[in-house]
Image: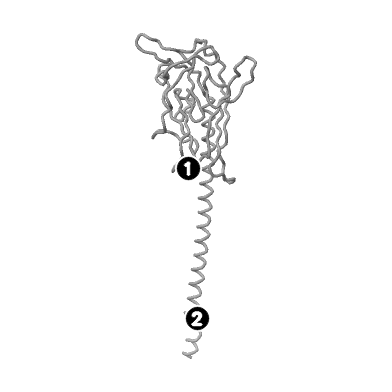
Amino acid sequence: MRVARHRAQAGVTLIEVLVAVTLLSLLTLGMFLAMRVGLSAYTKANTKLMDDRRVAGAQRILEQELEGLVPAFAQCGAGPGSPGARAAFFQGDAATMRLVSTFSLQQGWRGQAQILELLVIPGDDGFGVRLVVNERPYGGPMTTGQLCTGVTADPSGTGTVAHYLPVAGAGPRSFVLADKLQFCRFSYYSRGPQFNSPPSWTSEWARKGWPLGVRVEMAPLSPDPSRLQPISVTAPIHVRRNPDVKYVDQY
């Protein structure tokens, strides 16, 4: 009787324990790998989304800075006993541009007008180029006059054109608008030399007044169809003032 009761008791063999532990380990490993793949996919998608937002935001900022151009003037050569020469404030060539805008990176449309300096500089380790912008507060014609080195007659024979100091390079407070670019260049939509001449694009601004539009041409250094790429930006300049006329809201 005792032997029969002993044989009726349930039990687990060592092999069964080893099989159960092995299956549980495989299941845990599978769940861990699935979570790892999911987290990796989420990280990659989030990184790509943030890069796309950064590119779109930088292009929107660039458009707003250009469209917020202020028809400011520079009092060139002003000093004790000399009022200096008054000239429209705008400087531009293929790699640098200087203007006054009502839009700033720190305060948006709500803050003080800023003197913007946009420039193209070499990228990291000399690969490609990047577009950066410097900001400084605008305090009237005397502020912009500090950047002026002199004036010459306009090629059209009317008014004067100012010459400015070179745009300073990038510094600790410079903001990168676009990076890892194959090229970046500026061009300006200018009225024709004659009254009935059609407007045209030029790579250097050497006329009085302000352009009708500004175009920033960009191309990525390494094109990637799965990511939002920097594209060329064309911004109209809504300034229709004659630089030879002093309006009542100017000083």
Rendered residue at 50%/57% (across/down) = 36
Element carrying mark 2? loop
Upstream in sequence: badge 1 or badge 2: 2
Q: Position of residue 22 (x, y in %)?
A: 49, 72
Determine the image quadrant of residue 233: top right
Instruction: Classify residue 193 as left or right of residue 100.
Output: right
Label 1: which residue? Answer: 127
Element carrying mark 1? loop
In the rendered image, the residue lying farthest to the left is 80
Rendered residue at 41%/29% (across/down) = 168
Instruction: Say above or below: 21 vs 155.
Output: below
Label 2: which residue? Answer: 10
Task: Name the one closer to the observer, 225 or 121.
Answer: 121
In the rendered image, the residue lying farthest to the top is 81
Task: Name the one closer to the observer, 127 or 29.
Answer: 127
Q: Position of residue 89 (x, y in %)?
A: 48, 19
Rendered residue at 49%/17% (across/down) = 161
Instruction: Say above or below: 99 vs 1.
Output: above
Mark 1, other Cα within 10 Å: few <14 / some 14–19 / many ≥20: few
Amino acid type, label 1: Phe
Q: Position of residue 234 (x, y in %)?
A: 58, 29
Instruction: Say above or below: 165 vs 227.
Output: above
Residue 36: mark in rendering: none
Rendered residue at 55%/31% (across/down) = 216
Per the model, the C-alpha gap separating discs 1 and 2 is: 73 Å
Task: Name the one closer to the observer, 25 or 185.
Answer: 185
Determine the image quadrant of residue 164: top left
